[in-house]
Amino acid sequence: GARRLWGAHFDVDPAPLMEQINASIDFDKRLWAEDIEGSLAHSRMLARQGIISEADKVAIHAGLGEIGEEIARGAFSFERALEDIHFNIEQRLTEKVGEAGRRLHTGRSRNDQVATDMRLWTRKAFDRAQDLLRSLQAALLDQAAIHAGTVMPGFTHLQAAQPVTFGHHLLAYVEMFGRDRSRFADARRRMNQSPLGAAALAGTSFPIDREMTAAELGFDAPMRNSIDAVSDRDFALDYLASASICAIHLSRLAEELVLWSTFQFGFIKMAEAFTSGSSIMPQKRNPDAAELVRGKAGRIIGHLQALLVMLKGLPLTYSKDMQEDKEGVFDAVDTLELCVSASAAMIAGMRVDAARMRAAANVGYTTATDLADWLVRAKNVPFREAHGVAASAVKLAEGRGVGLEDLTVAELQAIDARIDASVQQVLGVDQSVASRVSMGGTAPENVAKAVAAARRLYLEE
Ligand code: ARG
């Protein structure tokens, strides 16, 4: 076991299957930059504290710098026999600078090292989530501004309910992604503490300075408890939980894009660049990208489940099970980032058929509520009674195969004598949306103001 950094007391080499199940280098090589960053901070601190010599620190830094360059230009050979990114880099460092390299691990363990690396890596993902979601909100806001007055049917139970404006509908997603951003921001704030210096689990007998390494690595403070520091993966759960909720929002948006772009709805045309044709049906333009955003949500949610289940029975502190945190987090981050970017591009590139939306808003008796509201407002009819009158009018129009606005005043009066000609002013879809001026309501003037407010709130920080 000569090559193994822990092998001195072993008589035999690991079985090939052991190497296969144990090695994480194939995926944790993604942590190389964070691993080097952590080692630079650690060795600087060791030198400052007089635990290693200044000369050793200089050698370590030079070696780590070269290793970073080797990895960046693809010239580093990662070895499974060296298990993981930590051992691969440390071994190469020792090859390069000799004994100084063997002093780097003083007062440190792979347990606090990997916890530090993962935090640093995930912290960047938290930051990218902010930027990507901001871009998605910007794309939604641009369309919402254009379509502040574009009338469409609003749905409940996927049945036409009341007319709304398309801009208002898009602003609903702006709010969802705003909450997602605040979830990511909360989690980032909570996770920004340094495990480095917890060592294996108990702390160390060396006079280390954890405040110094925490500050160097951009953490707000060292984690207070060494046992917690090496055991905790809450930050990864927080990312995955926030990502899962965000993925659900993306999936609901994607589902609506799929639905709206059907021939039957015809509300939008997807940007052609985000669709594909069919190998057999010549007329097809399938919304593959939106379907994949919807489908990939399952993967992100799955990674959250996997990590929750992996952690649930683990005793403190570190167990090798925890090495399984990485692939799920990496894949969830990649998947979420791809889905947010693709969604922003699809929103920016879609073409809206406003006439088609408006026509759809006009069918399905979507202004029946307006008729009931008018009876309440103009004739002081109790709402429950007004609801019954409007329902009778719907029934009459339905039987006739016409819209509410096509009924004559005489026909309406036959249902309820209190109705007069002025009711016709409220039965159109434009009047309906224009009347929804309550706070948070769909009236075009509200939407225009809401777009401006959302731009200030979400885009200007
Ligand atoms: N590759 C390991 C992981 O990702 C590093 C920590 C190993 N620590 C240990 N005590 N074996 O979890």
Image (cartoon, helix red, strand yellow):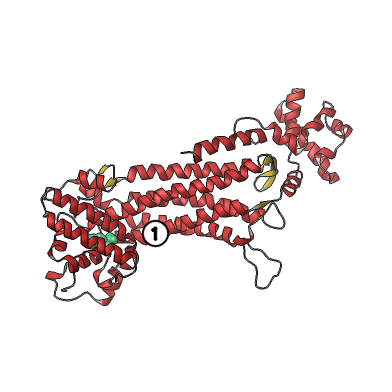
Query: Where residue 284 sits: x, y (%)?
Result: 68, 66
The residue wearing badge 1 is 330
The residue under label 1 is which amino acid type?
A: Phe
Residue nearest the observer in this picture, 418 or 435:
435
The response on whether ligand 1 sits within 8 Å of label 1 is no
Question: Which residue shows up at 70% across the image and 28% down it?
Answer: 383
Q: Is residue 358 above or below residue 445?
A: below
Q: Is residue 450 above or below residue 137?
A: above
Query: Where residue 268 sits: x, y (%)?
Result: 67, 53
Query: Where residue 106 sits: x, y (%)?
Result: 14, 56
**Helix, strand or loop at mark 1:** helix
Left or right: residue 380 versus residue 55 is right
| Residue 443 in view here | no
Residue nearest the observer in this picture, 385 or 365:
365
Query: Where residue 444 sits: x, y (%)?
Result: 67, 36
| Residue 76 in view here | yes
Left or right: residue 252 versus residue 437 is left
Residue nearest the observer in this picture, 66 or 39:
66
Question: Which residue shows up at 57% across the image and 36% down it?
Answer: 452
Badge 1 density bin: few <14, some 14–19, many ≥20, Cα 10 Å: some
